[in-house]
Image (cartoon, rainbow, N blue to C red):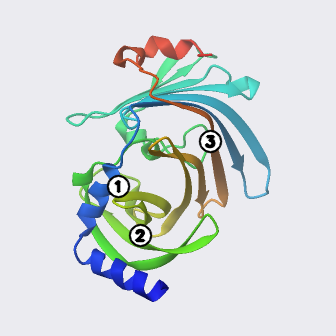
């Protein structure tokens, strides 16, 4: 049976190119907005850990997003706003309550670490399909929910864009018919060396597949980040007007 499934999947690969797979991933059915309470555990090379707790509200596939930090106490009130644009640079800013000031994140600083984690500001943004050249490398065996299953190995090579990454290799699973999710990714630095390994878990809520766990390992720094997404609520009818700087100063309930 597994051989038959592999043959069928192989046949499907040759009817679908890399760009079409990337588009299919992007067009997966998603909620209008998401609110969640999250935990982020940072582990350094000596296995020392630091835990951060945060609230996230996002809209339009996270093209608009606000994040407020609750813990540890020294970070309470620190907040982040991101608005992505198609025709100009994304807007990103941090509210730093200790300085009572905003800090704009410029495009030249998108490779900087987000709150000391292994996620950069670039990792918090969606990738534009047109910025990459895509190629399905092969069928691979992936472990998903303790089950070995065939998946696509998709290579995304950056065009002439400003990025800390030269390419990504993403393991993509067809979780349901015509529903594709990324479950693992290797990201390579500008010199082509492996920089980060990402592992992603999803859970189904209503008709949507929502990320509930993200593990990021920076192999060059021997440092890792585990993001767990909890208390998820969908389709809260967020208005665009809520995604403004002054709302960063108010931690939501």
Quickly name the residue at label 2. 192
- In this rendering, position of residue 88 left or right of residue 80: left
In this view, 184 is above or below 151: above
**Residue at 46% across / 23% down in the picture?**
236
* Dot 3: element: loop
**Residue at 62% across / 45% down in the picture?**
227
Q: Are marks 1 and 3 in contact (CB under 8 Å)?
A: no
Quickly name the residue at label 3. 116
Quickly name the residue at label 1. 25
Indicate which label's residue lies in the foreground, 2 or 1. 1
Determine the image quadrant of residue 235.
top left
* Dot 2: element: loop
Q: Residues within 10 Å of mark 1 (few under 14, many from 20)?
A: some
In this view, 77 is above or below 14: above
Q: Residues within 10 Å of mark 2 (few under 14, many from 20)?
A: few
Q: Residues within 10 Å of mark 3 (few under 14, many from 20)?
A: few
Residue at the limit of the structure toward the bottom, as seen here: 3
Say if residue 133 shows up in the picture.
Answer: no
Q: Where residue 190 sits in the image (x, y, percent)?
A: 39, 62
- How far, Cα to Cα, is label 2 from label 1? 24 Å
- How far, Cα to Cα, is label 1 from label 3? 29 Å
**Residue at 47% across / 70% down in the picture?**
193
**Residue at 43% across / 40% down in the picture?**
109
The C terminus sits in image quarter: top right
- In this rendering, position of residue 176 left or right of residue 115: left
Q: Where residue 220 sits in the image (x, y, percent)?
A: 59, 63
């Amino acid at each position: 049976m597994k051989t038959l499934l592999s043959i069928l999947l192989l046949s499907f690969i040759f009817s679908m190119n890399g760009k079409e797979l990337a588009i299919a991933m992007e067009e997966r059915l998603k909620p209008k907005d998401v609110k969640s309470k999250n935990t982020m555990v940072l582990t350094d090379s000596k296995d020392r850990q630091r835990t951060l707790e945060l609230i996230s509200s996002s809209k339009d596939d996270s093209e608009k997003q606000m994040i407020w930090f609750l813990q540890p106490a020294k970070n309470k009130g620190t907040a982040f706003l991101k608005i992505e644009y198609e025709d100009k640079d994304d807007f990103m800013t941090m509210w730093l309550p200790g300085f009572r000031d905003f800090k704009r994140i410029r495009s030249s600083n998108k490779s900087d670490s987000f709150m000391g984690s292994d996620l950069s500001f670039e990792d918090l943004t969606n990738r534009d399909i047109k910025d990459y050249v895509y190629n399905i490398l092969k069928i691979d065996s992936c472990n998903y929910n303790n089950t070995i299953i065939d998946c696509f190995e998709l290579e995304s090579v950056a065009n002439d864009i400003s990025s800390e990454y030269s390419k990504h290799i993403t393991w993509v699973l067809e979780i349901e018919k015509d529903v594709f999710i990324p479950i693992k990714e290797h990201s390579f630095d500008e010199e082509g060396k492996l920089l980060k390994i990402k592992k992603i878990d999803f859970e189904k809520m209503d008709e949507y597949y929502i990320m509930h766990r993200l593990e990021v390992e920076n192999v060059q720094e021997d440092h890792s980040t585990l993001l767990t997404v909890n208390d998820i609520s969908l389709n809260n009818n967020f208005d665009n007007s809520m995604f403004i700087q002054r709302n960063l100063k108010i931690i939501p309930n």
